[in-house]
Each structure stands twice: as C-alpha cells, then as structure tokens.
Amino acid sequence: MYIVENAFRNILRNRGRNILIGAIIFVIIIASVVALMISNTASGIIDDYKSRFGAEVILSANMDRLREEAMKNSNGGRMRIAPPVIPAEQYVEFGNSEYLYDAVYTASTAINFEDLTAIDAERGGQALQGTMYTGGEVSEPTSFYFSLQGNKFEDFETGYRDLAEGRMPESLNECIISSDLAEQNSISVGDILSGTSEITKKGSTFADAETMETQYELTVVGIYYDVTGEYAEGGRQNAYTNRRNELLTGYDTVVAPFVPDYSGITISATYYLQAPEFLDAFAEEVYAKGLDPIFDVKTDEASYNKIIGPVEGLKSISVTFMIIVLIFGGVIIALLSSIAIRERKYEIGVLRAMGMKKHKVAFGLWAEILIITCLCLVIGIAVGTLAAQPVTNLLLDYQIEAAEAAPSQPSYSGGMMMGMGGNNAFSADSDAQPLANINITLGINTMLQIIGIALLLASLAGLVSISKITKYEPIKILMERN
C-alpha cells in the first residue's frame, strides 16, 4: 500500500515530466481508440458483405476468350463478337447441385391480348421473329405489344413500384398489372385475361420454321403503381418496350407452356452457394455438366469492390495510422522514461540503501506510469469515441471520391438464356452504390484491445525503468551523486 501511495506523491511531485509523458500516452490512446473503432466496424461490414457476395454466383462471359473465338472465326474479315447463350437445359441442371442452398429463377416472354389496348399502342409493337416461310407461303412476323415477366419483383424492393390494390401473385396463372394499363382498359382485380405467345423450334431455318402458339389464362390479383422509366435510355420506344405494359407473375406461370428444343421464353437464374468456399467446387461441377469455357463462374466482384472498396481503404488507413502512432509513441515514451529514471537515480539509490528490494522499487515506478496511463485511458476513450464518427465520415468521403475518380474496368456478365434473340447482358459498370456512411460503435472487443494497448505502453515504460535501476548498485548510484 505504501508503494502505491508513494507513487501518487511522486506523480504530483514531478508534475512537469509526468504531464509530458501523460500527453504522449493520451494522444496514443485517442489515436488507438479511433483507429480500432474504425477498423473493427469496417471489418464487420466487410465480413458481412463478403459472405453475401461470396455466396451469390454469376456466370459471366470472359471478354478475352470471346475475342479469341471471334478472331478464329473472322477469316480475315470483320471481327464480330456474338454473345454466347447457355441452353435452358444446362441452367436447370446447374441448379441441381449439392453446393447450392437456393437458386432464384426469372423468366419472360412476349404476349398479346385481343381485348387489351397497350400503352403507346400507336407506336406499334415489336417483331421478335424474322420473316418465315411455312408451306411455301410467306409468314409475316408477329408484333408483340405486352411482356409477361416471371418472378421479377425487384422494383417493389427498391420502391419504384408499389401495390395499389389486391395482392401479389401466389399461385399459378395469377398476375398483377400497372395502374396505367388497368385504367386504360378498365381492368379490375379478379378479371381474367386471355393471351397468346409463340415459341419456335430451335435450329429451324426460314424455309422450314416451325412455330407453335401458346395460350395463357391470367387472373388479375393486384394492380401496382409504377414510377420506373417507361423506356430504357437509348432503347427502342414502342408498346412492347414500355414498362407499363409489363404483366408480373410467377416463374412457373411463364414457363408452363415451355416445350424442349423450342425458344421464345427468356430464362435467367441466380445461384446461391451454401458457403463461399464452395465456389471452386461448384465451378468445376458446372463445367463438367457442359458449361461453355467461354464463361467464368465467379461472384459479383464489381458490386463488391464498389460497395466495400472504400471501406477496405478506410480500414487500411486506420490500421496503418495506428501502427505508426504506436511505434513513434512507444519510442518517445521509452526515451522519456529513460531520461526520467536518470534524473531520479539518486532517489532510487536512497531507497535501495534504506533496504527496499529491487522488485519493490520497480513496482513503485511501474505503478506511477500505470496510474498515469489509467487516467489517460478514461479520458482518451471518451474523447476518441466522440472523434471517431467525424473522422470516419471525413476519411470515407475521401475514399469514395478516390474510388469514383478511378477509371472503371468493364464488366461482362453473361446471362443464362433460352429464347428470342439470345441476347447477353454486357454492363460497363455496376449499379451498386458505395456505402455513404458507417455508424461507428465502441464494442467490448474494441474496449479490450484499447486496454491491452494501454497496458502495453505502461509495461514498456516500466521495463525501461526496471532495466535502469537494476543496472547499478545503491552504493555506486550514491557515489556518482557525490
């Protein structure tokens, strides 16, 4: 007890020197609090997004391989890159994997209704098949005015569409329509719509094209408000491409008339792995099942980098800054402790001459630095917690600006299609938005890490003190004093 009381007296007696040591420790603790809070919060966010993006699989066309194939088939002429297509049979087979916990399927097809007038019908429809010759007679292509979309409800999640009345489709042959289309045709919930579509034999030529008409009987179970853009920017503008003419239904309803070896229904799928580490095994499996090597099996790296890139940069900056502060702070504390012990060499010699053991003298010196560290720890945690959020916001804004200023690399995503045109999606940039803000919190793990750093600093100063007092005997210290 005497040693601790004496430590308090010595702190007050040597206020100038201890204030200087305390100021260094205080700055180190504040920097550590801010850096660890940022780093640990960022790590949690990164792990969460890594698990989510790591579990979602996309099949994307490899542009380099596409160019190589195009050059092989160019024969010295103009190089044409044709979007590859994955047959429906393959994509269904890919979904039957032990590595997947879920597969989300979507589908769409063109459709016409005799008793409905499409929005912007005066702009005409869209022919999705070329002119065909059947039985020696020329057959004009069908112009479609509506599209039937299966399991495509993402706009309801983003808020661009909202249910006005009724409910969402739950059973086979149920659909919902836009309020604009319902108002124009006086459609109410409960009405039944009869529509026709077409599917065409795969591999058939114009001379022997084999087209089959399919029927849909759809019950309107809901009407939705729609604030999406009517037309895609730069795309065709006709009744078929107008999003107010989309009828939304379940996946099974769209694919019900599907016949093997026929096209006319566009299908896509998103696969979800049971765990991110199964990606390589799943890729090996789908290649063995016949996936064209032109495709890569990977996660959505573009979205991941856009969302998490600034957060990873933020974490890297905070950790680097903390390491630099700890190194320089530790060196300064060691130097100050060494100087302090030299100034107090006579005091230590007197205590040793009076019979105080080395370990008690060492404990007294360590108690002094520990008391200073604990005071700095309490105040430093409070100040650091207040400063962490503004510092985070400032650094995150800088990271987002740097990420947006960096040139984006094109991302080529191959769809899994069977159907009209076999078109592929090649996007130059991800629609994902980076995290605009991060809420920094002080968790128990962070608190324990900060306490550990504080004790490390105190121990460092204590070791310097112990090394000095054990270097000389009491008589030698007193003789040097004289």
Image (cartoon, helix red, strand yellow):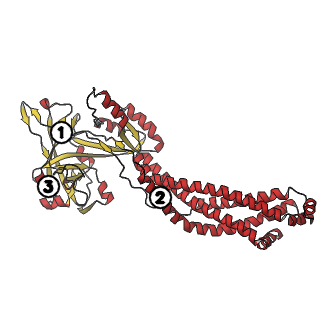
The quarter of the image holding the C terminus is bottom right
Quick check: 90 left or right of 125? right
Q: Earlier in the sequence, mark 1 or mark 3?
A: 3
Say whether residue 39 is left or right of residue 200. Answer: right
Identify the residue at the far left of this view.
137
Q: Position of residue 323 (x, y in %)?
A: 62, 54
Tell me which residue sits at (26%, 29%) in the image: 77
- Label 2 sits on what residue type? Tyr
Rendered location of residue 215, percent (x, y): 15, 45
Q: Is residue 350 left or right of residue 190?
A: right
Q: Earlier in the sequence, mark 2 or mark 3?
A: 3
Q: Circle 3 — which element? A: loop
Q: What amino acid is at disc 3?
A: Asp
Residue 261 higher or lower than 376, as above or below:
above
User: Residue at point 35% right, 42% down?
Assistant: 412
> Which of the pair 378/21 is nearer the observer?
21
Residue wearing tag 2:
398
Q: Which mark is residue 243?
A: none
Residue under pointer 3? 120
The numbered mark at residue 199 is 1
| Relative depth, front residue between 182 and 432 | 432
Q: Nearer the viewer, residue 179 or 345?
A: 345
